[in-house]
Image (spheres, rainbow, N blue to C red):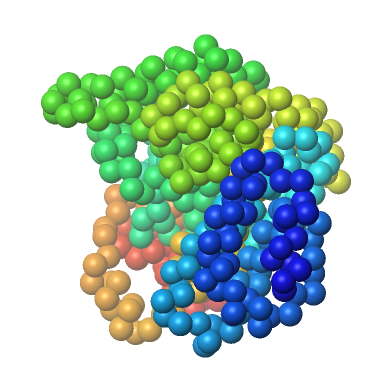
Amino acid sequence: MRKLLSSPVKMSLSDAENITYQNSLKYITELSLNLMAVKATVHPENFLGWCSELLRICRHELNMELLEKTQLPSLKKLQDILEAAVSIGQLKMTRIAPWPIYLNFVEQQQDIHALDERLRLLGYVEEIKAKPLADMLIEDRLAFSGKHTNQHDISVYNFDVQWFSSTKGAKLFHQLLTDKTTDFDAALAHIPQEGEVTFSHYEQFAQAYSAIFSSYTDDKAQGEKAPLAPATRLLAMRRPDQFIALTKAKIDLYCQGLSIAKFNAFDFKSYWFDLIGTIRTCAWWHQPQPEVNSENDRELVLWKNRAILLDCFFHADEDLANHSNFIKLRDKPKSSHSVKASASVARKRTKESAEMLVDKALAADDMPEYLLGMRGSIIKQVTEGKSVEHAISIMRGIFG
């Protein structure tokens, strides 16, 4: 362990990596007795590997029973530093990674980053995004904009709509998205759905998007600025090959990992010129579209989403996939008490809303023929407040 803890001294560290190492040492010192009790068998030769290995030890090999309560904050801070360092190191790799290496890394993250579930989200958005936001079912509009609700029936939305970036905390954004949906449609219309996206396209979007918030400020006499993060969610869902979805927490890591000047959560120009401009210099982003054939369908899907999938280069712990709202709802124990409770607060749907949800569920490839003939009965139950999954399960129980 002593050799592992001191090994970065012999590495050729950048200034930023040296600062990270020095910050780590502050907390390593406080945990030194606990760390020294662990036998280190892996000794990485680079700083990214060192951070990953020490983080693994902190998570899985420390004897937590021997830690004092006063040491727990130090352990948490050390883990936070190492997690950030891993994210930065992995993002740094993308600056020089060709497409095959980029693709292979993303595929390696399949389980830990819930890649298949993320791709189901992106595939679903691909199907609905030709329709204006104003014409979408409200659940679809929230799936596009990144906010999960209890109305996202898992028989239809078999993914967490908040992957890549959640906008659940952006209350004003969602208030305006509800009140001025057509204005957001007008803003997004400046971004072409295929082909090149230029700065002119982006600038027109940013101006139209910001004007929505400026209008609210004028009406309410409040100093609200247009938030960048929700805008990037809209952009990345419309063109996942061109844009990255941000959260406030990710901005600093992206800036450090891609070696660009840090910008704030309202800086639309730096997002385009620095962040998007940087990924457009990367070899993986310039990869020509793979040929369309049955053998490389997966590669084609990943290529079409190559910008937004940069999110998979962030550090993820083993539990990230299980934090998915879809997984939580899917695996939630169902008791008679919970069924009664949910029934008591069930919200009735409009017939149009129920029809859309039922038709999406019945479109599944494995849907039995007899259920297709019961569309009207299922719609009636969903209109009255049952979930699509519950209504279909009733029919399966009676007629299956």
Q: Residue at x 63, y 76 (%)?
A: 35
Q: Where is residue 201 in the image (x, y as percent from the top left)?
A: 52, 15
Look at the image and tell me whether residue 257 can be seen: yes
Which quadrant of the figure has residue 332?
bottom left
Query: Residue at the location (72% across, 60% down)?
Result: 50
Examine the rendered structure and indicate whether residue 276 appears above or below residue 292: above
Out of 166 and 155, give the one closest to the viewer.
Answer: 166
Tell me what residue is drawn at x 55 percent, y 55 percent.
23
Does residue 228 sit above or below 190 in this rendering?
A: below
Quadrant in which the N terminus is drawn: bottom right
Q: In this view, does 152 lie to the left or right of 106?
A: left
Expressed as whole percent of the image width and height from the top left, the position of residue 172 reads: 27, 38
**Residue 127 point in image, percent of width and height:** 56, 39
Along the line of sight, the residue nearer the viewer: 138 or 215: 215
Q: Residue at x 65, y 20 (%)?
A: 195
In the rendered image, the vertical position of residue 326 relative to residue 397, given as above or below:
above
Q: Is residue 20 left or right of residue 216?
A: right
Relative height, residue 350 to residue 252 (above, below):
below
Q: Where is residue 69 in the image (x, y as percent from the top left)?
A: 42, 80
Residue 127, visible in the rendered structure: no
